[in-house]
Structure formats: structure tokens, C-alpha cells
Amino acid sequence: MNKKGHVALAVATGTVGLYFMADPALQSSIFPATAIVFASSVGGLAPDLDHKTSTASKHIQFPAKYRHLLRSMSVFFGVVGLVFMLLSYVGNASSTLGEWSRSAPLWLGAAVLSWLLARLRSLVLIGIGALLLSGYAIYDLHWITAFAGFAFLVLPLVSHRGVIHTPEFAAVLSVGLLSFSTQQPELIYALAFGFVLGWWAHLAGDVFGSEGIHSLLLPKLKIALHWFHNGGSAERWIARVCWGCSLLIWAMLMFQNHFVF
């Protein structure tokens, strides 16, 4: 599925999950109810963080044309900096070149900075992973913090539809988030519950496509139903049905419950 299909399916899944929840307080309170559906939409896109050009990844990196420009600038600045550094060791260099050679560290620094900006996505993911692991080690946080931190660290290294697209990863993530959120305020539980629903909805959507998903423990086990192609007419109709179901269920909830803020 593409972005629109994943979001529609995730919102529908979150809305259905909200409707069948055993806790009526979450159904009748507008903030937890909307938090579940919103978190579902986020969870429906989150697994595609392992794709360098996905919608989720685009929010933490520059567009492709700027990344290409930054890589070119990095090479240019690096070459100029190395040339000036070599000139600083040449004794008979002209006075003008000698003055310019002093700027070699600045050119090399610009090269490093351009290289880092071109890989901003990897830096952000690694930074988030390092912060989560540090928080787990220093403040003795819930184990899901360490699990998420390690996942962020390896994201720049894994291929699309790799580890985080497996049912095993989703199962551990679900157990960790739900076990953590049950001891938190109602709104935190709603966000975690919705995110988990959206994550599983993403995997379910991929199952219907041609690429499917595979097992982490049994890599040769792959589920792909080949029902439609990404962005095709079938997916667009599924998205419309999902949005229609979501609106219908919300109307039923509003009729049955008087939402409170």
C-alpha cells in the first residue's frame, strides 16, 4: 500500500478498535478517543521509516535534490580543503596562496557539515536511538525504551520491509507499549493503543500487496496475497471504504455517547 491506503486502513482500524473497547470512558471522552485514531494514523506510517524515501522519512531529511547538492558540495569543499592543506606545506607558495591555505580547516569543516546534512535522516534516527538507550540506562526506564532505542539505531542499516516489517517485531513492540502504557494516564494508554493498532494495520495492508511481509524467525515464510498493486484502483477503493466505515462508526459513537472534554 502507499501512503493514502495505509492511513485510511490505519484510521479505520483505530476507529473499529475504539468502538469495541471495553472501557466506555475512552469512548465517551473526546481527547482519548481522538488520540486513539490519531495515533493509529501515525502507527500506520511508522513502519516505513526503514524506507529512505517514505513519507515518514521525508519529515526528517532534505528532499532528494538537496541531498544530491549537499553531497556534491561535500566533495567540492573537501577537495578544496585538501588542496589548501597541501599548499600550507609547500615552502615556495605565493603569499596569496599562503593566506588562503590557512582556511583549509574551514573548507574541511564545511565538507563534513555538508556530508552530515546530506545524511540527516540517519543522524536523526541514530540520535533518537542513542537518547532512548541513554534514558533507559540512566533512569531505569521501561524495557520498551531500550527496545525502541536499539530499533532506531539499526534503522539506517536495514532494508525496506526488513526487520521492523515482521510480525515478531510488531508483537514485541505491542507487548512493550501496552505493558508500559497500562501504568500511565489514560491519554498515554490511548496513544499507545492506537499506535499499536496502526502498526498492525500497516502490516495487514502490506500482506494484500505483491511484496507482502515475511517472518523474522522463518525468513523463507512470506505472506503476499497479490490482491492489488500499490496505488492501483483496488487500493483506492479500499481506502474509500475504510474512510466511509470510519465516518459511519464515528457517527454511531457520537449518537450513542455524549462526548465530554
Image (cartoon, rainbow, N blue to C red):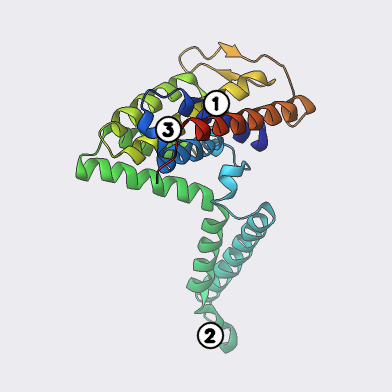
- The number of discs equals 3
Relative vertical location of residue 122 with respect to residue 37 in this rendering, above or below:
below
Visible residue check, residue 6: no
Residue 235 position, x and y percent, is 72, 27
- Determine the residue positioned at 52% across, 71% down: 85
Choose the circle earlier in sequence order: 3 or 2. Answer: 3
Alpha carbon of mark 3 to alpha carbon of mark 1: how far? 20 Å
Which residue is the site of mark 1? 201
Amino acid carrying label 1: it is Ala
Residue type indicated by callout 3: Gln
Instruction: Using the image, tell me which numbered label, if any, was put on residue 27.
Output: 3
User: Disc 2 marks which amino acid?
Assistant: Glu
Front disc: 3 or 1: 3
Circle 2 is placed at which residue position?
A: 99
- Asked whether the residues under the numbered discs 3 and 1 touch, taking CB atoms below 8 Å apart as contact, a structural biologist would say no
Query: Which is in the foreground here, disc 3 or disc 2?
Result: 3
Percent across and percent down for residue 116 are: 51, 57
Checking the image for residue 163, the label placed there is none
Query: Pointer 2: residues within 10 angstroms few (<14), some, or many (20+)?
Result: few
Tell me residue 119's x, y (percent). 54, 51
SS assignment at label 1: helix
Helix, strand or loop for disc 3: helix
Name which residue lies at 54% across and 58% down: 117
Q: How far, Cα to Cα, is label 3 from label 2?
A: 71 Å
Q: Could you give the CA–CA distance between mark 1 and mark 2, rounded to whole angstroms?
A: 62 Å
| Circle 2: element type | helix
